[in-house]
Amino acid sequence: MLRFCLHYGIHFIVPIIIGYFFFKEQRIRAIIILLAAILIDIDHIIATPIFDPNRCSINYHPLHTYWAMGVYLGLLFFRKTRIFGIALLLHMLADFVDCLFINS
């Protein structure tokens, strides 16, 4: 239950908190972008099985690789893409926390 709450809390509650407190001028837009990062899980459709609760997504799915995370990190350095970088890295954090539970 803790694993579920942490994983989905980071996916859905933390983005709302970040958008609300750090993007006050465009709060709704920021929250929508931050929540939309869940769409990166589209790369799960090429895995067999599509969903495996005991599989660590990090460095398994193409959009969850360390190379991809480097690109997401690079997005932080440009004002126009910063929110997307935050959103994608926050998604990677949620999946990383999930991996910690899987591997413990």
Image: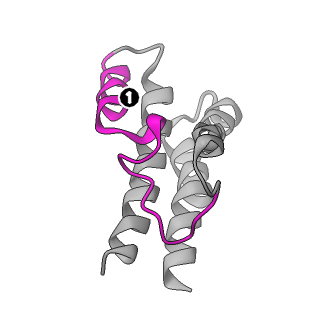
Q: Residue at x 39, y 53 (%)?
A: 93
Instruction: Give the image location of residue 49, x and y in percent.
Output: 62, 58
Q: Nearer the viewer, residue 48 or 29?
A: 48
Q: Residue at x 45, y 54 (%)?
A: 57
Query: Vertical placement of 6 versus 47: above or below?
Result: below
Badge 1 crowding class, 10 Å Cα cut-off, few under 14, some 14 to 19, many 20 or more, is many
Instruction: Give the image location of residue 24, x and y in percent.
Output: 57, 35
Query: Vertical placement of 11 versus 39: above or below?
Result: below
Which quadrant holds the N terminus?
Answer: bottom right
Instruction: Give the image location of residue 85, x and y in percent.
Output: 43, 30
Amino acid of disc 1: Tyr
Q: Which residues are magenta?
A: 51-77
Side (left or right) of 22 relative to 12: left
| Total labels drawn | 1
Q: Residue at x 41, y 15 (%)?
A: 79
Instruction: Give the image location of residue 22, x and y in percent.
Output: 48, 40
Can residue 55 be found in the magenta stretch?
yes
Farthest bottom residue in view: 1
Q: Quadrant of residue 42?
A: top right
Query: Vertical placement of 43 versus 49: above or below?
Result: above
Of helix, strand and loop, which one carries label 1?
A: helix
Tell me the residue that label 1 is attached to: 72
Q: Residue at x 48, y 47 (%)?
A: 91
Q: Nearer the viewer, residue 80 or 73?
A: 73
Side (left or right) of 34 relative to 80: right
Side (left or right) of 88 relative to 51: left
Can residue 94 be found in the magenta stretch?
no
Q: Quadrant of residue 52?
A: bottom right
Side (left or right) of 65 relative to 48: left
